[in-house]
Image (cartoon, helix red, strand yellow):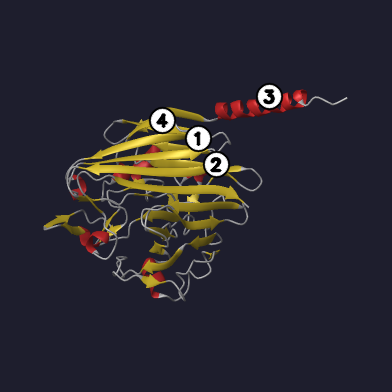
Amino acid sequence: MKKSLFFPMTILYIISLLKTCQQEVNARFEMKTWGKSSDTENVNLYTLENSRGARMQVTNYGAIIVSLTMPDKNGKYEDIVLGYDNLEDYLKVNPYFGAIVGRFGNRIAFGKFSIGETEYQVPVNSGENHLHGGFEGFDKVLWSAREKPVDRGVAIELIYNSPDGEMGYPGNFTLMVTYTLTDDNELIIDYQGSTDQATIVNPTHHSYFNLTGNYGTILNHRLMINAEQYTPVNNLLIPTGEIAPVDGTPMDFRKAKEIGRDIQLDFEQLTFGFGYDHNWVLSGKLGKMKLAATLFEPVSGRLMEVFTTEPGIQFYSGNFLDGTITGKYDVIYNYRDGLCLEAQHFPDSPNKPDFPSVVLNPGEIYTQKTVYKFSTR
């Protein structure tokens, strides 16, 4: 007699349905009051968790990613970004841990730039240069925040309205940033902005990553950067305007290598940056999604792939972490205990006409997408 397949197929369907329902239950978005900012406004902490158990915490102060947990090769979830346990420390001293920086991320020489015939002066807050939007950039303001419905994941939408003249920048500029934690363990960052006056725009995300989950040095992480060229800097860390080949230099990450392999070599660019603190010119078309970098930590087996629409990526090897900061879990952050991979337009672009333009005009929409995708091997 021919056996019926109905019963086992029905059982399999029910099991599949239960798994799907369990995933939907597990995905969550929660908000709690975290404290007050210096102007006594409430600051919130948002917890986002996907259906696989990856979790991200975000605060509307600075649009900061406070924590990001991802599994290792054995399925153990650990926090892979540096930061603080409490709001008070973010309000005191924060080297941009996890923040959105802007209006212009990275450096502008002497804090000066021109749009057309008009010259602007923005604050000089890093030696002789302007860095990451000034003394009160986007990392030190309150953003409005709300949950954003998405398929197969959980997301938060953050909006900041930067008034004309803030930190010396022209135009009323509105920036919306959406963090999405997908069920594929991706962190997707979407940016959209508009202005009522010509201005310059170059926001980026500034998480310090350490894929060990236990912190310690990042020098054993294996990094690949999809770039044949980079932008050399002078001793003030301002690009010279040259676009130079990486071939034959310690700046060559076209094939994955340990970050510590060449970092101590006698090479002028490494001397100027106290290690790696440079912009790489990514292979691929401007505005099109492309693989920018991969980062692999062999003990945990964690792999991070970075994709972006931006023309460049800043690799910073944590050269100014000096043991004076005690972060989450009472961990002291020492020299090169974290690294940044910041998708961006090039540093000092307003003063380098050969670099891709960062000018945004009224009626135009600024967009950027960057994806950090996590897996193990």
Quarter occupied by residue 316: bottom left
Mark before the other along the chain sequence, 1 or 2? 1
Alpha-carbon neighbours of circle 2 within 10 Å: few (<14), some, or many (≥20)? some
Residue 343 screen position, x and y as percent: 39, 54
Mark before the other along the chain sequence, 4 or 3? 3
- Write down the residue under mark 4: 147
Q: Is residue 320 above or below residue 241?
A: above
- Write down the residue under mark 1: 153
Mark before the other along the chain sequence, 3 or 1? 3
The answer to whether the residues at label 1 and label 2 have Cβ atoms under 8 Å apart is yes
Alpha-carbon neighbours of circle 3 within 10 Å: few (<14), some, or many (≥20)? few
Residue 375 screen position, x and y as percent: 58, 48
- Write down the residue under mark 3: 14
Q: Amino acid at mark 1?
A: Gly
Residue 289 screen position, x and y as percent: 43, 52
Identify the secondary structure beneath mark 2: loop
Q: Amino acid at mark 3?
A: Ile
Q: Nearer the viewer, residue 257 or 116?
A: 116
Task: Report whether 158 appears left or right of 223.
Answer: left
Q: Nearer the viewer, mark 4 or mark 1?
A: 1
Q: Nearer the viewer, mark 2 or mark 4?
A: 2
Q: CA distance from mark 3 to mark 2?
A: 23 Å
Q: CA distance from mark 4 to mark 3?
A: 31 Å
Q: Is residue 274 visible?
A: yes
